[in-house]
Image: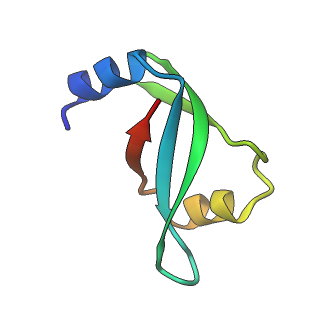
Amino acid sequence: MKKAELKSLLARYRQIKLSVIGRKSGKTISNPVWFVAEGDTLYLLTLRGSDTQGYRNLLKNPSIRIDDAW
């Protein structure tokens, strides 16, 4: 997806389903997150903050996938 397409999609929604790779299992793990898009920056807010396994997975492998938006 091109950057302009992603920005257009995100402008219509406030929550996305974000997938990361488990740092130990290697499996894809998906969770809903709230976000704010500002310019070229996407700020993410998880339901439980940064003290989660999902956040640790993201630190280990910062590659993400957006699966859904609503």
Picture residue at 43% right of the left edge, 53% below the top:
64
Q: Give the x, y percent position of residue 48.
A: 78, 47
Rendered view: 53 above or below 31: below
Q: Nearer the viewer, residue 36 or 61?
A: 36
Q: Position of residue 6 (x, y in %)?
A: 29, 28
* Image side of residue 16 versus residue 11, left or right: right
Q: Nearer the viewer, residue 37 or 40?
A: 37
Q: Residue at left 74%, top 42%?
A: 47
The residue shown at (75%, 50%) is 50
Question: 11 and 3: which one is in front?
Answer: 11
Rendered view: 59 above or below 12: below
Left or right for 69, reference 3: right
Q: Quadrant of residue 52?
A: bottom right
Relative to 52, does residue 38 appear above or below in the rendering? above
9 left or right, relative to 30: left
User: In the image, residue 24 lies at what x, y percent?
Assistant: 58, 83
